[in-house]
Image (spheres, rainbow, N blue to C red):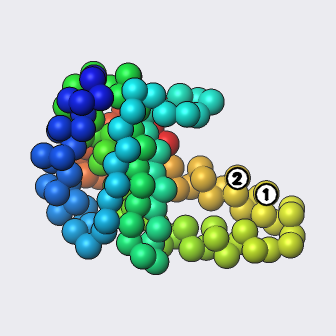
Amino acid sequence: MRVDSARKWIRQNLPRLQKRFKLEDWELTVEVTKSIEDADGPLAKCHPNCDYQWAIIEVGTEDIQSDKELEMVLSHELLHCVLSPIDQIRDLMAESDNELAKSIFYRFYYSTIERTVRNLELILNLGIKSAKIV
Ligand SMILES: [Zn+2]
């Protein structure tokens, strides 16, 4: 998908998705580029801030084929915003001096969050199949 087409679709549809996920009070910034930087080449990433209810969502369009797929990708990232109160536990753990506890926590934290987002996708029938969304 072209970057300008994705930007246009997002401008037109983000308010609807914010409403769907009860994120109307959030300030969402969606940065759209051809590809985003990550070793695994994900389609999108989300950096939510639960305390101040804002998020920066990065979307790379080169592997997104359609508006429907773009909606699925954005929906996945918005679910990360919905779950962001749990990030406060992660941020608290970051202050710990116990490196072993931190490494164990992080290992389970990221897989648990991702599994929970994917389960919510199934519950909400979003039809997301891509393993490249993180
Ligand atoms: Zn994810």
Q: Residues within 10 Å of mark 1 (few under 14, many from 20)?
A: few
Mark 2 and mark 1: Cα distance apart in space:
6 Å
Which quarter of the figure has residue 50?
Answer: bottom left
Callout 2 touching callout 1 (CB < 8 Å)? yes
Residue type indicated by callout 1: Ser
Name the disc covering residue 91, or none: none
Residue type indicated by callout 2: Arg
121 above or below 85? above
Which element is circle 1 on?
Answer: helix
Report whether residue 109 is seen: yes
Percent coordinates x, y for residue 98 in the rendering: 87, 70
In the picture as drawn, the residue positioned furthest to the front comes out as: 4
Count of numbered badges drawn on the protein: 2
Percent coordinates x, y for residue 120 in the rendering: 35, 54
Percent coordinates x, y for residue 9 in the rendering: 17, 38
The residue pinned by badge 1 equals: 103
The residue pinned by badge 2 equals: 107
User: On the rendered structure, is 66 left or right of 98?
Assistant: left
115 above or below 60? below
